[in-house]
Image (cartoon, helix red, strand yellow):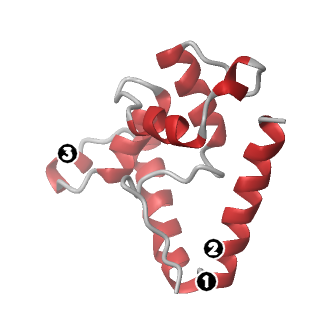
Amino acid sequence: MIRRESSDPYYDMLEDWDLLVSSFLSQYGMRIQTKEFEKVSWDEFRTLLSGIAPDTVLGRVVSIRAESDPEVIKHFTSDQMRIHRAWKDREAGRAQKMTDEDFCKGMNDLERMFAAMCG
């Protein structure tokens, strides 16, 4: 049985792709959809992704999604609350809906996307 596992369960590579692209550019100066990025292996990509800093757009969104301290949450702006609630709602719904077949299809789609980027 395949399980969805991540070292950081507060982002989704497909749904957060734009945030990921922006964060790679701001932190590493790398444009993901270029010839330069074709040289990056999957292992290196995962390492770079795991090192995304909290001051990038993805890092900021992840910190909002991951916050569990009610005192901090109560001082969130309306945009931060929207991000936090949307993620919690998404994860609650996903836990009920995600099947092994859906997971495998998503991973296959992601693999094809990276293969197409790398030529």
Q: Secondary structure at mark 3?
A: helix
Which image quarter is the C terminus in?
Answer: top right
- Left or right: where does residue 44 sit relative to residue 104? left
Compared to residue 70, the image places residue 20 above or below, namely above
The residue that mark 2 highlights is 103
Q: Residue furthest top?
A: 29
The residue that mark 3 highlights is 72
Tell me if label 1 and label 2 are in contact, CB under 8 Å: yes
**Residue 36 picture quarter:** top right
Compared to residue 6, the image places residue 13 above or below, namely above
Tell me if label 3 and label 2 are in contact, CB under 8 Å: no
Q: Which mark is residue 55?
A: none
Which amino acid is tagged 1? Asp
Q: Which residue appears at 33% of the width and 42% of the height?
A: 63
Q: Out of 93 and 99, give the one closest to the viewer.
A: 99
Q: Which mark is residue 100?
A: 1
- Left or right: where does residue 40 sit relative to residue 64? right
CA gap between label 1 and label 3 equals 35 Å
